[in-house]
Image: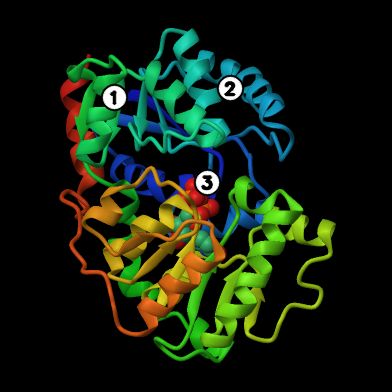
Amino acid sequence: MNHIPILGVVGARPNFMKMAPIARLLQNHRRFKLTLVHTGQHYASMSDPFFRELGLPTPDYHLKIGSTSAAEQIGLVITRLVPILRKVKPRLVLVVGDVTSTLASALAAHKLGIAVGHVESGLRSFDETMPEEINRRLTDSISDFCFTHSPEADVHLRREGIQGKRIHRVGNLMIDTLLRLQPIARRSRIQEQLKLKRNGYALLTLHRPSNVDHEEDLRKFASLLEKIGQLIPVVFPIHPRTVQSAQRFGIWDPPPVALRLIEPLGYLDFLKLQEDARFVMTDSGGVQEESTVLGVPCLTLRDNTERPATIRRGTNRLAGTNQKNIIAHVHRLLSGDLPRRRVPPLWDGRSAQRLLDVIEKSFPGD
Ligand code: UDP
């Protein structure tokens, strides 16, 4: 029997965790064959180690588009992906998340008349200044399969006129990866290496353009973190985007003692630090979801979130960007006022299988 070709696209760090469980299920699949394309939207240090740790196969094609402007990235992805699509002739192109590559690959496939499946569809922050929000909306509008992870995602899609038969609630694929690798992450030695004690530190990630691109905003965070650092040590694996801003503005040179600035971590080390943190502070989408499943309190340093399920059911609190409010949230957590943990339904480690069930039914074979 001829295999049905499917092409999966990844481009940046948060994509890898979502594609990994699909790639695993499609390895040696009796009906489907996965071709994996890496657009190379991110710095290599934020990419290569993840392939090893997550067990992602080496990409069949690497587009090497690099960190240029989003508009140029879109142009480069389309130009370089189209010949591959013509050669591989996939019946379905799977894209994940909300990065520039996600939108560009979906567009390339759609224009060639190839079905598009969007993993993590329907998330909305309703903040159109976020590049990701535009990527999500546009990708969903041209996706034939909208794979969602929460009821509100389905509601958003329906409101935008996407018919119910295109919407498939399969759950959270990122959590498939987390639950599979959690036992291995628990063996990480990162805490010993950093001389940290379980529950004795807060873990921070910060890289959204709205928080780090402008000097005033980043200075505000620097001063806030100095204050939080006096209450509890803060470990900060710093994203290259934030490093660039900090260098440009002369911030954290040198960093205050209680702020442990370290290189971005691999997935397993980061998961270990997350699970054992007293609490997490973040502007990342994925970290809000992971901390909810781990049951670790999370303060989201943004004024909105596209992941309300992590607040409604999980351990996330929208702390905003106002210094006073954030410090008040930190005091609440340190005094033992902790959010309850309830994991959203279908964040259970079996989402990729449900996604594959949908695909199997939709492409019954030649
Ligand atoms: N992550 C990681 N190392 C780090 C920081 C984050 O492996 O130093 C992982 C984290 O566990 C999650 C993903 O990266 O799985 C989130 O990616 P990111 O914050 O870059 O993107 P976002 O979720 O905001 O789109």
Check disc 3 and give the amino acid type: Thr
The answer to whether 362 is drawn above or below residue 282 in the figure is: above
Residue type at mark 1: give it. Answer: Leu
- Give the answer, above or below, for where 53 lies relative to 93: below
Does the residue at mark 1 contact the one at mark 2 (Cβ under 8 Å)?
no
Structural crowding at the residue carrying mark 3, measured as other residues with C-alpha within 10 Å and reported as few (<14), some (14–19) or many (≥20): some
Q: Nearer the viewer, mark 1 or mark 3?
A: 1
Q: Nearer the viewer, residue 223 or 297?
A: 223
Q: Earlier in the sequence, mark 1 or mark 2?
A: 2
3D distance between C-alphas at marks 1 and 2: 27 Å
Check disc 2 and report the residue beneath it: 81
Q: Secondary structure at mark 3?
A: loop
State the residue position of label 1: 157
Q: Earlier in the sequence, mark 3 or mark 2?
A: 3
The answer to whether the residue labelled 3 contacts the one labelled 2, judged by CB atoms less than 8 Å apart, is no
Determine whether, in the image, residue 242 is placed left or right of residue 278: right
Which amino acid does the dot numbered 2 rest on? Leu
Q: Nearer the viewer, residue 249 or 183?
A: 249
